[in-house]
Amino acid sequence: MNTDAASPAERADGLHGSHTDVLVVGAGISGIGAAHRLRSDFPDLGFLVVEAQENRGGTWWTHRYPGVRSDSDLFTYGYRHKPWRGPAIAGGEEILAYLDEVIAEDDLAQHIHYRCRVTGLEWSSHDERWTAQVSRVDTGEQLQITANFLWMCQGFYDHETPHSPTWPGLERFEGPVVHPQHWPVDLDVTGKRVLVVGSGATAATLVPALAGDAEHVTMLQRSPSYWLPLPTKHELEVLLEPLELPVEWRHEIMRRAYVQQLGKFAAASFDDPDSLRELLIETIRPLVPEGTDFSKHFTPSYRPWQQRLAVAPDGDFFSEMRAGTVSVVTDTIAEFTDRGALLSSGNSVPADVVVTATGFDLAVFGGIPFTVDGDRVDFTTRVTWRGLMISGIPNMVFAFGYFRHSWTLRVDLVYDVIARIFNQMREQDTSVVTPTPHPQDADMPLLPWMPEENFNAGYVRRSQHKMFRQGDRAPWTHMHEYDHERVALPAADINDGLTYR
């Protein structure tokens, strides 16, 4: 790999026209993790991180609705190299503080440039480099940055435009209508009736948080979700506390415990879904208030883990139900009125505030247009190499985590493979690596990037038409489980399907 990066002094003079070895797009948990690995494993490589938002954190910066938290445990959501010291289920501010520690410990702040939105990425085989077109969000200034290698860490959904269905009469509603992705900082729900439309992970977080101030919160769902009332503290964590173990030991023990627990759930969702379904349903049955139509509101029609489980730390959602501050309605919206929603059943839900917790849409690599040697890239015609590169696109890797396990578990594994690729390029004195299907793979079918029988969340179904594809054989498949990839990725042949020159 070339190492002709701009010096820190040159970078200080401005980004426009600068060159770097590695350009990282995104300063969320994936981008900060990538920066850490570059800093620790390749200290002689120059790198820049560009981020469209005005601060770090990605999801944890843009999502500021009440109660925002991770629905994955932080022992596995946190980085492998950085022990998590707080409670297993943590809020957005705690996660941001954790990321700030990583940035400070690795002196990464000098490498991160905020309010820099990448608007185009162009690869030149002649120059063996990428050119990034960048727009300064605050000034409108147009910049160009060149890089030998591109590391995409922009996340997987559209940060700007959430998924917002249109309902008849919504314009007649007289109160605020808000989406959690764009939560107003001055919204006060004290003493008000709040209608939350949706029952996914966001609603599971938001509803109990609003219930503390609102007169009443109604969660309206089209169909039930599976719930998991996890304790904020794992029972093993409670046992370990008196032992005063080193932080690193405690972190590794808890990390392994959660990996094992989640692995059993994930495996059961395929191998014994009926038993898992019964376990999940019967776990929450005692938590639901008497008189609730349990079959209607809490018995999903799909296989467990075909969508993410709705996590209720210490059963907080159900505590609010029993207190009478939260209710669940399973129905669809016929139309909105000035003071609430009229449902298809003929019933109505009065409301002073409507929250559309209706999810998000995926954006392929942030919606950034790619060109390779002047040709626009159509990702729907290309397959992924092990879920971290794309066929025919040179010197580009990306971070994509798990849906059933913590995102970062996979990111750490992917970064190990990237490090092996970088080292091999050095050993071979090559500058370019490109995923290239074998001749015998020419007739390989282009399969959906995520088969719906595997995972069928709304944002997956809505986005299949614009996503890259996968094949029916290694190394052109992805979306495997952690138990498979924790073995398969470290053993992956980085010559199989990759060409170096």
Image: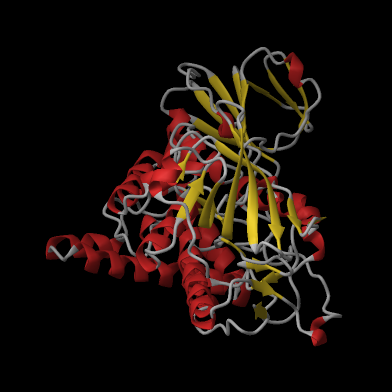
Report which quarter residue 475 is drawn in. Answer: bottom right
* Residue located at (69% from left, 38% from top): 163
Q: Is residue 33 above or below residue 180?
A: below
User: Residue 310's x, y, as percent?
Assistant: 53, 50
User: Residue 412's x, y, as percent?
Assistant: 45, 66
User: Residue 192's x, y, as percent?
Assistant: 52, 17
- The answer to whether residue 464 shows anywhere in this view is yes
Which residue in the rendered view is the most extreme toward the right?
Answer: 443
Report which quarter residue 78 is drawn in. Answer: bottom left
* Residue located at (84% from left, 80% from top): 442
**Residue 311 falls left or right of residue 470:** left
- The answer to whether residue 324 shows anywhere in this view is no
**Residue 96 falls left or right of residue 417:** left
* Residue located at (78% from left, 30% from top): 166
The C terminus lies in which quarter of the figure? bottom right
- Along the line of sight, which residue is nearer the eye, 421 or 321? 421
- Along the line of sight, which residue is nearer the eye, 227 or 182? 182
- Along the line of sight, which residue is nearer the eye, 495 or 235? 495
Q: Is residue 208 above or below residue 36?
A: above
